[in-house]
Image (cartoon, grey):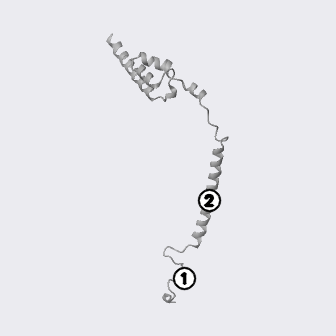
Amino acid sequence: MARILIPLAFIAFAFWVVSIVDCAMQPEVRHRGASKRVWILITLVPVIGGILWWTIGRSRPSQMQAAAPSAPPPDDDPRFSASDERIRRLEEELAMLDVEDAFNADDAPDRDGAEEDEPDDPRDARG
């Protein structure tokens, strides 16, 4: 008999703890029938409080979706298209900067700061 009661007691205790934690972590709008504080007090009653919480007190996600307005998809959202325009403009600016860098790289002197064909000082040119 103890082989059955000990696992059942462990399962009942785990269910009770999960019920208390779930009740405490849910937002206030997910509690049906009473306030959050009352439901936490109800779930403190071992096993029966948890059963009441899961059957009566906790609203289901499908009920929450019906009550909450859904956001428009990105294709229909004007804020999304405005940010898309901003991204396009930034990409154009980056492309212009790349062109400027390529143009400046062609005219840039060597690492020592002088062109290859011209010496640093014309007096040093011994030829």
* Residue 8, position as x, y percentages in the image: 37, 15
* Residue 105, position as x, y percentages in the image: 57, 69
Which kind of residue does numbered mark 1 sit on?
A: Glu
User: How far is disc 2 from disc 1 in space, using C-alphas?
Assistant: 36 Å
Residue at (61, 69) in percent of width and height: 103
Residue at (42, 19) in percent of width and height: 42
Identify the residue position indicated by label 1 in the image.
118
Is residue 97 positioned above or below 82 on the image?
below
- The answer to whether residue 1 is left or right of residue 87 is left
- Describe the element under mark 1 as helix, strand or loop: loop
Identify the residue position indicated by label 2 in the image.
93
Residue density around tag 1, few if under 14, some if 14–19, many if 20 or more, within 10 Å: few
Towards the viewer: 55 or 99: 55
* Residue 3, position as x, y percentages in the image: 33, 13
* Residue 109, position as x, y percentages in the image: 54, 74
Which kind of residue does numbered mark 2 sit on?
A: Glu
Is residue 38 positioned above or below 73 on the image?
above
Towards the viewer: 120 or 16: 16
